[in-house]
Image: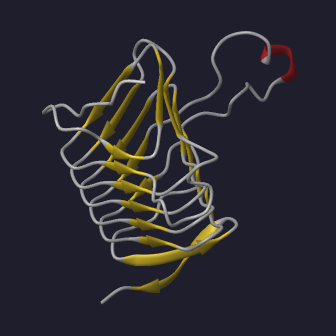
Amino acid sequence: MSECQNVIGNPIKHQPLLLIGKGKISFGSNCKFGYKESPQFYATYTYVEARNPDAKIVFGNNNYFNNNCSIEAIHSIEFGNDVLVGVNCSFIDNDGHNLAVDKRKKGIPNSAPIKIGNNVFIGDNVTILKGVIIGDNAVIGNGSIVTKSIPSNVIAAGNPANVIKELQ
């Protein structure tokens, strides 16, 4: 397996990374995937899929993703700079299948872009769904399911995730 390179040619370090799909995936400098001392390092990989030709996934600079993350875009997913992501997180910009029974086997499911701001910290076992924007400096608590946008400078947690505290 060849080593994945970011857009300026530096190696992307650590855990295996599966890049798949017909779309565009781009990396800023110093993107890291996997951490040897965390669970599932040897058993999993980071899965990144830009499914359609017009789909895009953009990683900013100094992003760190822990083990067993899944990132799937039909439209777009963008990560700002200095983003930290915990173990076993998912970012999905679509429904997977159309919700209407008669349309489920046809066409593309509903989709809306995901955007993660700068200096965002996402805990373990978090799922971020279509149409979500997470503001700069936000913290998302472990086990959260993020179904709506989260403003900057807050801590959000729960299922569904809600703001529980403002950061100073």
Give the farthest residue toward the bottom: 168
Residue 62 vs 70, above or below: the answer is below
> Which quadrant, please, contains the N terminus?
top left
Question: Which of 148/66 is in front?
Answer: 66
x then y, percent, for residue 116: 37, 53
Q: In the rendered picture of this protein, how many numbered marks are placed on residues? A: 0
Question: Which of 17/83 is in front?
Answer: 17
At 74% across and 9% down in the image, what residue appears? 106
Residue 72 vs 37, above or below: the answer is above
In the picture provided, is 130 more to the left or to the right than 1? right
Question: Which of 135/5 is in front?
Answer: 5
x then y, percent, for residue 104: 79, 18
In the picture provided, is 74 more to the left or to the right than 116? right
x then y, percent, for residue 101: 86, 22
At 54% across and 65% down in the image, what residue appears? 38
In the picture provided, is 20 more to the left or to the right than 161? left
Residue 26 vs 118, above or below: the answer is above
In the picture provided, is 100 more to the left or to the right than 81? right
Q: Quadrant of residue 166?
A: bottom left
x then y, percent, for residue 133: 42, 53
Q: How is the image coloured?
A: secondary structure
At 50% across and 35% down in the image, what residue appears? 112
Give the farthest residue toward the right: 101
> Which quadrant, please, contains the C terminus?
bottom left
